[in-house]
Image (cartoon, helix red, strand yellow):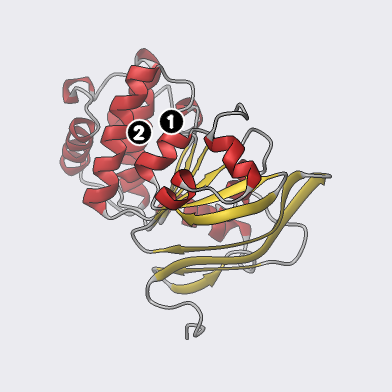
Amino acid sequence: MKRPDLDRATLLEARGVSRLYGPGKGCEAIDIRLHRGEVLGIVGESGSGKSTLLRLLAGMERPPMPARWSIDSHEGELDLYAIGEARRRALLRMEWGLVHQNPRDGLRLGVSAGANIGERLMALGERHYGQLRAAGQDWMGRVELDPRRIDDAPKTFSGGMQQRLQIARTLVTRPNLVFMDEPTGGLDVSVQARLLDMLRTLVRELGLSVILVTHDLAVARLLAHRLMVMRRGQVVETGLTDQILDDPQHAYTQLLVSSVLTP
């Protein structure tokens, strides 16, 4: 039975999430709620704690202090920090998706592009070779990669192409929840622009629920419906994206928006 405070529109809720590595390092007592079909952007300068928070929310790290974390999964409501590590890993592999800043962290470079995409489907039980290959070609086209390169290894692709392939690998199973960690980081401006257009289209078409970590406010404005601004491990401001970026209330957010602080 679901708790009354986890309503049908809420996909994820976490309260009191903390992991500190020193004064102002990490994140402290963070409360977060993500609604279905929403893109929540977590922004702040380098070292603000946003990537630590993402790892905790994705179950890649476990908070040393008690926290409550609930998600409406295919099995009903789950408490991420109460289930075992194997189940958390299975969630990330089968129900969730993770897009790394460095695509090499999210791809198997020694196998083909098609195999990278197909592996996610195989984890869900798909075994028909023809269907796996067709899905690989379809998703390569969706992310603007040449489907004729389905048998090529990702190590032969450029950085931008590898990121597109990682996105295809992540989204092919239409995950319930997607974590994105600086998905356009390290790419040329022109490559970033095309990737952002593609991501915005896929998020809209698939109705994705996304937690996005980025230091780039332009990326946040294009992709996120709502923002959380982090500084020294704490959330200093939260609200609708346009409200935060057009009329920031906290002094730190004002500095971010005016580009006084550099990432």
Specify which label sits upstream in the sequence, 1 or 2: 1
Q: Is residue 82 left or right of residue 148?
A: right
Q: Badge 2 is on which residue?
A: 116
Determine whether 248 is above or below 133 in the image: below
Amino acid type, label 2: Asn
* Residue 223 quadrant: top left
* Residue 52 visible from this viewpoint: no
The residue lying at 25 percent from left, 22 percent from top is 151
Q: Give how far across and how far down residue 130 sits, in percent.
A: 15, 39
Residue at disc 1, secondary structure: loop
Residue 71 drawn above or below residue 260: below
- Can you give x and y, in whole percent of width and height, for residue 23 in the image? 84, 45
SS category of the residue bearing label 2: helix
x and y percentages locating residue 76 in the rendered image: 43, 75
| Residue 170 vertical placement versus 234 (above, below) | above
Q: Which mark is residue 246?
A: none
Residue located at (48% from left, 74% from top)? 77
Q: Amino acid at mark 1?
A: Leu
The residue labelled by disc 1 is 107
Q: Is residue 7 left or right of residue 46?
A: left
Can see residue 227?
Answer: yes
For this rendering, which residue is in front, 231 or 32?
Answer: 231
**Residue 173 image position (x, y, % from top left):** 31, 50
